[in-house]
Image: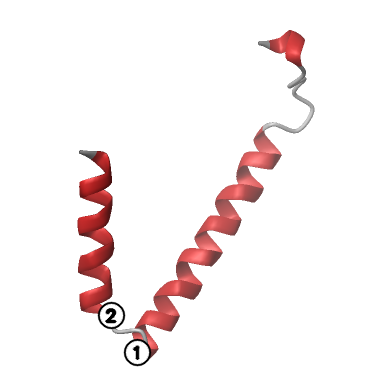
Amino acid sequence: MRVLATTAIVNALVRAFPASSLQALALKQLLLFCGAVFFIWLLSTTYGLDLSAGFF
């Protein structure tokens, strides 16, 4: 079910923003930036946290 929902969302985005569209390029850059910010936030929240096997 989750795969079908993801596929539907991706297909809707592809139809809304063709590959050669300037809007698609801007959206892609925005999503990449948000992903980078999330990754840095995740790293900063786990800074100093012992994530070794003994933690789990």
| Circles 2, 1 touching at the beta carbon (< 8 Å) | yes
Q: Is residue 44 above or below residue 5?
A: above
Label 1 CA crowd tier, 10 Å (few <14, some 14–19, many 20+): few
| Residue 15 falls in image quadrant | bottom left
Label 1 sits on a secondary structure element that is loop
x, y percentage for residue 41? 62, 45
Q: Quadrant where the C terminus lies?
A: top right
Q: Which residue is drawn at 77% across and 18% down?
A: 52
User: Which mark, residue 17?
Assistant: 2
Neighbourhood count class around disc 2 (C-alpha, 10 Å): few under 14, some 14–19, many 20 upward: some
The type of residue carrying mark 2 is Phe
Residue at 53%, 65% in the rendered image: 32
Dividing the picture into quadrants, the one containing residue 25 is bottom left
Amino acid under disc 1:
Ser
Q: How many labels does the image show?
A: 2
Give the image location of residue 36, x and y in percent: 60, 58
How are the colours assigned in the image? secondary structure
The answer to which of 49 and 28 lies nearer the viewer is 28
Tell me the residue that label 1 is attached to.
21
- For label 2, the SS is loop
Residue 55, percent from left and from top: 71, 11
Image quarter (top left, top right, bottom left or bottom right) of the N terminus: top left
**Structural distance between the alpha carbons of marks 2 and 1:** 6 Å
From what the image shows, is residue 16 above or below residue 31? below
Can you say whether 29 is above or below 32 in the image?
below
Q: Residue at x 69, y 41 (%)?
A: 43
Q: Percent x, y for residue 2?
A: 26, 40
Q: Up-down: is 44 above or below 14?
A: above
Q: What number is the disc on residue 1?
A: none
Task: Please give left or right for residue 50 compared with residue 12 in the image.
Answer: right
